Image: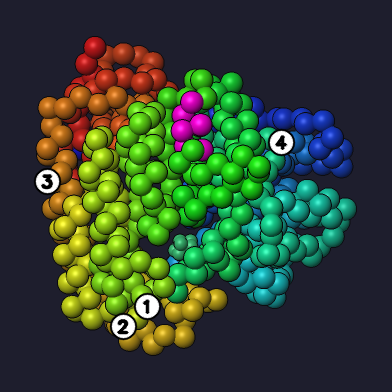
Amino acid sequence: MAETFDISLDSLAGCSVAPQNIAVPGTFAPSTDGATFFLETFGCQMNDHDSEKVAGLLLSRGYRQVESPDAASLVLYNTCSIREKAAQKVFSRLGEYRTKQAPGQIIGVLGCVAQQEGEEIFQRTPWVSLVCGSASYRRLPELLSQLEAGNQRVTGLDNDADETFETPVTRRDNPWRAYLTIIEGCDKACAYCVVPFTRGPERSRASDSVLREVRELVDLGYSEVQLLGQTVNSYADPSARKMRFSDLLLAVADVPGIRRVRFTTSHPRDFGADIVAALEAQPKLCNHVHLPVQSGSTRILRAMTRTYTRGEYLEKIAMLRSAKRQIAITTDVIVGFPGETEDDFAETLSLLEEVRYDSLFSFKYSPRPNTPSLSMPDAISEEEKSRRLTLLQEAQREIQSQRNATLVGRTFELLVSGKSRREHQWSGHTACHRVVNFASQERALLGTYVQVRVTGAGPNSLVGEQVT
Ligand code: SF4
């Protein structure tokens, strides 16, 4: 069975390759002398990466990053509102400043809760001075200047942006895998989702700019990049080159020094044969696709406005399964969407059996403000949603156990990203995005690629030993 590692990638992320103090000509603001910031991030990888860019921007203005909000003159929360719990957590954090805000300390809210709640945040927590949604991040330098000039109420709440957020410096938290957003926002309008409201319309970054950043990442020592977007495969190159997403994948893989390219999240509607062909042709493209299905019932998919049927989704899966390389497939599922009957849920369970995903993220439906499904009667009880979620997770656990068991005896290349407190124990990811905990007598493996033979399997991870 897999064991839990007590030092993970997250806790090692402090040893970033990025310097702590960065000066960029033309961006340094002398008024911030001695200023410090603390930035906490909630939510998805897009938010993580946005925070890396915000941190880079602050460092380039002369701020210094600190580990505790108590030591910071500027405290920022980059927030998530995809589920009610995540939004509540942010307000509970903000509530602490009712009594503990230090004189002169500035509190700011970024991200989806900022966009969703807008100026209401000032009413609810009057000690907050900055409210800025992700579609307005390109205005952050101007908003920071207003704060630095002493303005107490600063907002960036556009959601009709036509540009992506780019910074001269990104302060990267992950020393081995670099995130790179290639498309922001979403035009898909799924009935349950706040993203089109909080992140605005889709806008892609020019392919030249993406490739330039990839080359810079190689110079910084990165060999693995992960291209990000809420619908990454809906990428539409705004430059004259008009690269398709699959062309961009191949071009990124061709950058000398790049060894692994990942991408997430793909929308089934825009997932075409050209992407599978690229995965087949270029082994540097990791053999893993995250393809959220959300429900196995066409009736519910229609209610969700997912723009595909069960049958059309399964055609995409068939395309991936028929590839010459074995490609790991993972997904997201929501249970208890308004109107989901027992039969609809049974169809989701049968889809799991049919596809046999390598991993799955599952959630109970919860109504969110500014979404079309808010007006649909949410008649399924919490108890029933929990029952369906448990059944789904049990079914998937069994599938994962069986799939992982077939990997015992096989050898994989891992990028080593974790070290256990127990001597000679390490962990890393395969190209197909499985975690393998393994033994090795080597002393300095972090950030290197090693060959590991799998000796045991659990539902969530594998164990193995390094082979020479
Ligand atoms: S594709 Fe749907 S679920 Fe994904 S971000 Fe867009 S609206 Fe939300």
Q: Indicate whether residue 250 is drawn in magenta.
A: yes
User: 430 or 291: nearer the eye?
Assistant: 291
Which image quarter is the N terminus in? top left
Residue 455 placement, left or right of 94: left
Q: Name above or below for residue 10 compared with residue 146.
A: above
The answer as to whether callout 2 falls within 8 Å of ligand 1 is: no
Residue 356 position within the rendered picture, expressed as x and y whole percent measured from the top left: 18, 52
Which residue corresponds to mark 4? Answer: 168
What label sits on residue 303 in the rendered view? 1
What's the distance in space between the residues labelled 1 and 2, CA to CA? 8 Å
What amino acid is labelled 3 in the image?
Answer: Gln
Q: Quadrant of residue 147?
A: bottom right
Q: Quadrant of residue 373?
A: bottom left
What label sits on residue 402 in the rendered view? 3
Which residue corresponds to mark 2? Answer: 339
What amino acid is labelled 2 in the image?
Answer: Gly
Q: Which label's residue is closer to the chain start, 1 or 3?
A: 1
What amino acid is labelled 4 in the image?
Answer: Pro
User: 269 or 90: nearer the eye?
Assistant: 269
